[in-house]
Image: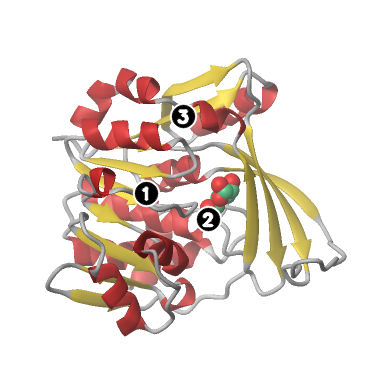
């Protein structure tokens, strides 16, 4: 099997609004600069792996509009194969509205647009790619039927980043090799309240039936890898956080990159933690995705 990666997921136009803090329900805050970037968890994760040197194909959908065309051109320029991204004449390219606070935290609302039109048939049309890929990576910004089709057709390692969170049935979870939730997504999967303490996170992760491994991202605390008989907490290198948007995508793309190269899961998680840390040091989701050299410099290797 090659070290090829296929990503099934979203492409969005991100509008980022600087705010002193994320507004509470009912609160109005005065914003600062507004900027637009290319985003969407699918494209971010595809680009993250491509920037680390992998051959990556993306399956998704954009609108038949200028946004979609220029987006695909930019991805191609960065080496991502977008043959599997089609244009929808009835829906616009997806959008995301992001509040970015002074403490680097964010809150995001996504308007799916064409992402909502990715179907199981689109995924099946890329069946050969999925059969040949070492890693297939998906998120939940496209319909569940498309994700299920990808899990079904994938012959390599199937990695799922269950974001945005939703409850998932055993039929899909049993086909997932590695699931990568954050704390709140893990709580949704478990049907329980979010837990803070690492020992409680490990217990919640271990309660999930189906995936071979659970990798819980912990923000500034790094990540914890949980298997049925083992656990490993990886803390991140110290960095100055400017924007946490897309850090989880950098993590997932780097994890897929390492797994596609045949790296063991514990070292793959160490690599992904370093990539996530690198990604918070710059503004924007895709603009902040690190190169192999930048990640290596944070791992001390
Ligand atoms: O994970 C960050 C991404 O979430 C943003 O780029 C935004 O588009 C949303 O999909």
Look at the image and tell me in which quarter the C terminus lies.
Answer: bottom left
Location of residue 12 in the rendering, given as x and y in whole percent from the top left corner: 60, 39
Q: Earlier in the sequence, mark 2 or mark 3?
A: 3
Q: Report whether 172 appears left or right of 186.
A: left
- Residue assigned mark 2: 246
What secondary structure is found at the residue carrying circle 1? loop
Regarding mark 3 in the picture, which secondary structure is present there? strand
Q: Dot 3 surroundings within 10 Å: few (below 14), some, or many (20 or more)? A: many
Instruction: Return the residue nearer the eye: 80 or 224.
Output: 224
Q: Which residue is mark 3?
A: 60
Using the image, determine if residue 178 lies above or below residue 123: below
- Dividing the image into 4 quarters, which one contains the N terminus? top left
Cα distance in 3D space between marks 2 and 3: 18 Å
Q: Position of residue 93 (x, y in %)?
A: 63, 29
Dot 1, how many residues are within 10 Å of its Cα: few (below 14), some (14-19), or many (20+)?
many
x, y percent for residue 101: 71, 68
Vertical relation: 299 (above or below) 282: below
Q: How is the image coloured?
A: secondary structure
Number of marks in the rendered image: 3
Q: Position of residue 83 (x, y in %)?
A: 41, 21
In percent of the image, x 48 and y 76: which residue is there? 220
Residue 181 seen in this snapshot: yes
- CA separation in Å, label 2 and label 1: 15 Å
C-alpha span from label 1 to label 3: 21 Å
């Amino acid at each position: 099997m090659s070290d090829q990666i296929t990503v099934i997921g979203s492409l969005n136009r991100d509008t980022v609004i600087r705010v002193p803090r994320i507004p509470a329900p009912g609160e109005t805050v005065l914003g600062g600069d507004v900027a637009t970037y290319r985003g969407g968890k699918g494209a971010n994760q595809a680009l993250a792996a491509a920037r680390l040197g992998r051959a990556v194909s993306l399956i998704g959908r954009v609108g038949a509009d200028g946004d979609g065309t220029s987006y695909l051109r930019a991805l191609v320029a960065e080496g991502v194969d977008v043959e599997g991204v089609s244009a929808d004449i009835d829906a616009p390219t997806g959008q995301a509205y992001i509040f970015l606070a002074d403490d680097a935290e964010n809150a995001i609302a996504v308007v799916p647009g064409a992402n909502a039109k990715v179907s199981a048939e689109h995924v099946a049309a890329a069946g050969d790619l999925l059969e040949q890929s070492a890693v297939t990576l998906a998120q939940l910004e496209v319909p569940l039927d498309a994700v299920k089709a990808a899990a079904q057709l994938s012959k390599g390692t199937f990695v799922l980043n269950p974001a945005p969170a939703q409850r998932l049935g055993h039929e899909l979870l049993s086909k997932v090799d590695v699931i990568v939730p954050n704390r709140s997504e893990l709580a949704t999967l478990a049907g329980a309240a979010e837990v803070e303490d690492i020992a409680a996170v490990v217990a919640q992760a271990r309660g999930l039936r189906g995936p071979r491994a659970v990798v819980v991202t912990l923000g500034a605390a790094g990540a914890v890898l949980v298997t049925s008989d083992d656990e490993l907490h990886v803390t991140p290198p110290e960095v100055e956080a400017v924007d946490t948007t897309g850090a989880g995508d950098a993590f997932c793309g780097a994890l897929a990159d390492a797994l596609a190269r045949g790296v063991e899961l514990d070292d793959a998680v160490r690599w992904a933690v370093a990539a996530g840390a690198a990604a918070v040091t710059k503004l924007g989701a895709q603009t902040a995705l690190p190169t192999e050299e930048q990640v290596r410099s944070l791992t001390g290797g």
